Amino acid sequence: MVNIINLEDYGWEKPLPPAAAGFLPARVTAVHKERYELICGHGQAFGRLKTAVYYGRGEEFPTIGDFVLLQYEPSGDSQIVKTLPRRSFFSRRDPSPGRGEQAVAANFDTVFVMTSLNKDFNVSRLERYLALAWQSGGTPVVILTKSDLAEGVTVQEKAEIAETAFPGVDIISVSAVTGQGLDKLSVYLRPKKTAVFLGSSGVGKSSLLNALAGEDIMDVKAIREDDSRGRHTTTHRQLFMLPSGGMIIDTPGMRELGMWEVSHGLGTAFADIEEVLSRPCRFSDCRHQTEPGCAVKAAIENGELTAERWNSYLNLKRESRFSDDKIAFLRKKQLRHKTLAKWSKQKKKNGEIRK
């Protein structure tokens, strides 16, 4: 019996371009090295990249949540021939030296920025995550997990800290054990909507996913008692369909989260600082350090800004600038390699280089 799937239930909402005639649209639901799990009109499928397209023409490599076009093969692996345009995209600097950008997830509506109410709670780390979340095109929501393991006053205090640090961002305290706060997430997990989990190892992503799914679909590992940190439970990125009809993209915990082209996200995450910076200082070339008549200095002195938040902004700005320089270098390097490859191919074609 053929399992017919309506791809619109998985977030598909646009007609195929004329050039896509003869190909089948699908959504990437899991990534396993060089093999992709997919969902399409025929149900679950597996696919591999068409080498000539992705390695020859420089097509954007697909990631979890992407919509792609297939040369569908019912009895084996299909060929993925194109990555369709994304409405949101999350990436980070690849931890491996010299690798550049690493895709994380695509085509989501909400970014659940997760931190637990134990020693993992760190405002500076949340600022980094939120800058990347805003840059992605999704709407960030801060999820404070493991409220059952914290005293009531601790939950309230940390929630107030987060609300003060991130005005305009929804802050929700939840417990996967007691179910507290889970109902508040339903507005983000309506049918055809996709949310992506973002957080360090041990914050409870897998436990929360199991609670939302109503069954144990992910293994859960205990955290270390000495530092309240966990080890990676999720080993690859995967998209799950929930009973509500909403979808969750679960990602491995990130030990190192690098900034990557976050000019827009940084400005949104630090909108309060951007507003202060728009005010005139006494000197047009003010460095916002010790100069008299500095608007930033005045905002810190009158309590409008904290020195810690200003320093966090400066640190992320420097890191973002370094990443921008690195991006430019990598793109020049890639262009040089493509030019050399094209030159070599033309020389071989003309018989100037022996094959």
Image (cartoon, rainbow, N blue to C red):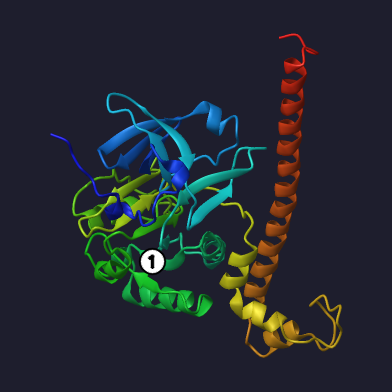
Residue 34, image quadrant: top left
Image point 66% across, 62% down: which residue? 316
Residue at position x 68%, y 70% in the image: 311
Foreground of the two, 31 or 82: 82
Q: Which residue is denoted by mark 1 in the rendering?
A: 144
Residue 276 position (above or below residue 3): below
The C terminus, quarter of image:
top right
Return the x and y of residue 120 as percentages of the image width and height: 46, 59
Along the line of sight, which residue is nearer the eye, 331 or 134?
A: 331
Q: Is residue 202 left or right of residue 85?
A: left
Res. 127 in view: yes
Query: On the rendered image, what quadrant is the N terminus found in?
Result: top left
User: As drawn, is 55 to the left or to the right of 232?
Assistant: right
Identity of the residue furthest to the top in this view: 354
Amino acid type, label 1: Leu
Residue at 45% across, 67% down: 139
Q: Is residue 315 above or below residue 101?
A: below
Who is closer to the viewer here, 134 or 313?
Answer: 134
Which of the two residues, 167 or 154, is positioned nearer the viewer here? 167
Percent position of residue 157, x then y: 42, 77
User: Image quadrant of residue 219?
Assistant: top left
The quarter of the displayed image where residue 26 is located: top left
Residue 344 x %, y %: 75, 22
Residue 112: where, in percent of width, then height? 41, 62
Residue density around tag 1, few if under 14, some if 14–19, many if 20 or more, within 10 Å = many
Relative height, residue 133 to residue 30 (above, below): below
Q: How many marks?
A: 1
**Going 39% across and 66% down the picture, which residue do you hit?**
143
For mark 1, give the secondary structure. Answer: strand
